[in-house]
């Protein structure tokens, strides 16, 4: 079972970009938009993590159920 490191870098990259956008919007005085950008970024990363967890559970299922 090989670990896909690129997914970790994608999540980290999204986090850095969202943090930068949040900071810029907050400096401009648009705190509501900054919060929405953070929430949308969180949802995108959450979907990525759910997809990765699904792959993990499928791998565990194939190992222990011998499918």
Image: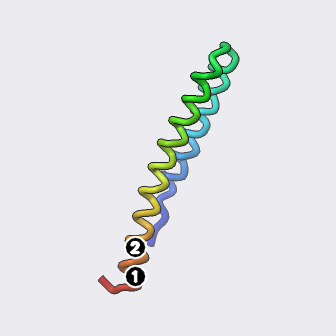
Residue corresponding to mark 1:
63
Query: Where's the C terminus, which quadrant?
Result: bottom left
Residue 57 or 35: which is nearer the viewer?
A: 35
Whole-number angstrom distance, CA of label 1 to CA of label 2 = 6 Å
Of all residues, the one furthest to the right in this rendering is 27
Residue 17 or 37: which is nearer the viewer?
A: 37
Q: Residue 18: name its quadrant.
A: top right
Q: Is residue 24 visible?
A: no
Q: Secondary structure at mark 2?
A: helix
Discs 1, 2 touching: Cβ within 8 Å: yes
Q: Is residue 41 visible?
A: yes
Q: Position of residue 28 (x, y in %)?
A: 66, 13
Query: Where's the N terminus, which quadrant?
Result: bottom left
Residue 54 or 33: which is nearer the viewer?
A: 33
Reply above or below: 58 against 13.
below
Give left or right: position of 20 versus 43: right
Q: Secondary structure at mark 1?
A: helix
- Identify the residue at horizontal 61%, vertical 22% (top origin): 32
Q: Residues within 10 Å of mark 2 (few under 14, many from 20)?
A: some
Q: Return the mark for residue 59.
A: 2
Of all residues, the one furthest to the left in this rendering is 67
Q: Position of residue 65 (x, y in %)?
A: 36, 85
- Identify the residue at horizontal 58%, vertical 45% (top origin): 12
Reply above or below: 8 against 1.
above
Give left or right: position of 31 versus 53: right
Of all residues, the one furthest to the top in this rendering is 28
Reply above or below: 29 against 4.
above
Give left or right: position of 26 versus 12: right
- Identify the residue at horizontal 61%, vertical 36% (top origin): 16
Q: Position of residue 27 (x, y in %)?
A: 70, 17
- Identify the residue at horizontal 51%, vertical 46% (top origin): 45
């Amino acid at each position: 079972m090989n670990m896909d490191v690129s997914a970790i870098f994608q999540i980290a990259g999204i986090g850095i970009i969202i943090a930068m956008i949040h900071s810029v919007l907050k400096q401009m005085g648009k705190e509501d938009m900054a919060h929405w950008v953070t929430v949308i970024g969180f949802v995108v990363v959450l979907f990525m993590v759910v997809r990765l967890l699904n792959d993990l559970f499928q791998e565990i299922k194939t190992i222990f159920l011998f499918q």
